[in-house]
Image: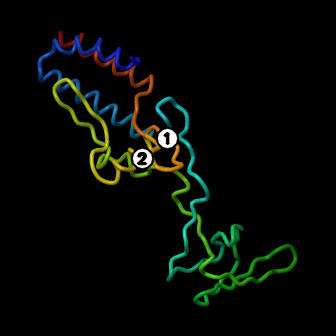
């Protein structure tokens, strides 16, 4: 039996002495705070134990849109090499651009189909996942549940929580940190001291 289960068994006996309305109020308070704490951890890409989540794989590159264009100074990958041009001209299927290298300038031709841009998704995972629209706290008499219930957010969170997809490292999206358990214990004690 893990520490959380032992802790819950001890607390359940005390909470059972409260009126149903008091149990709902306590569950709402705890559920709201645990939801907020999990949302902060998800935003900062931190596991409940305080360690960082496993990083994304690869460079996460994306193709240039069919009608998209390059701007001068915009970095891009061409056959795996990072390139940044000081001037660019768009000629449909190819770009012509130049850059200064030492004392002379160089001009190159770049095929649109081989130009890759670094995706912004490289920066941080789960940017929208902790929004209240998807991460919700539900309370009932004597219980509070925090999680993702429907839609793509639930699927993404479940895949990362278990690492179920091929080559996907597990990332604990929802969980209890030692500070969370200590906070819950302290909140229940304070509430019981006032209510009983």
Q: Tell me the tag on residue 170.
A: 1
Q: Quadrant of residue 105?
A: bottom right
Q: Residue at x 36, y 50 (%)?
A: 155
- Residue 81, percent across and down? 71, 68
Q: How crowded is mark 2: few (under 14 residues within 10 Å), some or many (20 or more)?
A: some
Quadrant where the N terminus sits is top left
State the SS at label 1. Answer: loop
Q: Quadrant of residue 178?
A: top left
Q: How many labels does the image show?
A: 2
- In the depicted structure, whether residue 3 falls above or below residue 83: above
Q: Which residue is drawn at 75% across and 77% down?
A: 99
Is residue 6 left or right of 145 when viewed as pictured?
A: right
**Residue most toward the right?**
103
- Residue 29, percent across and down? 26, 28
Q: Residue at x 16, y 12 (%)?
A: 17
**The one of 179 and 148 positioned closer to us in this rendering:** 148
Q: Tell me the tag on residue 36.
A: none
Is residue 142 left or right of 124 when viewed as pictured?
A: left
Is residue 100 left or right of 181 when viewed as pictured?
A: right
Q: In which quarter of the image is residue 176?
A: top left
The residue where tag 2 is placed is 159
**Residue most toward the bottom?**
91
- Residue 21, percent across and down? 12, 24
- Residue 41, percent across and down? 45, 38
Which numbered disc, 2 or 1, marks the residue that appears first in the sequence?
2
- In the depicted structure, whether residue 119 falls above or below residue 135: below
**The one of 76 and 98 positioned closer to us in this rendering:** 76
Q: Mark 2 and mark 1: span between their CA atoms?
A: 8 Å
Q: Residue at x 58, y 52 (%)?
A: 57
**Residue most toward the front?**
166
State the SS at label 2. Answer: helix
């Amino acid at each position: 039996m893990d520490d959380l289960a032992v802790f819950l068994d001890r607390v359940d006996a005390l909470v059972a002495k409260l009126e149903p309305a008091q149990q709902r109020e306590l569950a709402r308070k705890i559920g709201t705070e645990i939801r907020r704490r999990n949302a902060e951890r998800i935003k900062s890409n931190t596991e409940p134990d305080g360690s960082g989540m496993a990083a994304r794989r690869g460079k996460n590159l994306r193709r240039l849109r069919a009608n998209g264009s390059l701007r001068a100074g915009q970095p891009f990958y061409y056959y795996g090499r990072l390139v940044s041009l000081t001037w660019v001209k768009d000629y449909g299927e190819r770009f012509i651009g130049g850059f200064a290298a030492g004392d002379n300038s160089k001009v190159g031709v770049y095929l649109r189909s081989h130009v890759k841009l670094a995706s912004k998704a490289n920066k941080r995972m789960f940017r929208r996942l902790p929004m209240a629209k998807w991460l919700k706290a539900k309370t009932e008499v004597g219980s509070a549940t925090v999680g993702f219930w429907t839609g793509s957010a639930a699927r993404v969170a479940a895949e990362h929580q278990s690492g179920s997809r091929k080559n996907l490292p597990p990332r604990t999206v929802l969980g209890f940190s030692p500070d969370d358990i200590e906070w819950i214990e302290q909140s229940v004690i304070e509430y019981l001291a006032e209510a009983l």
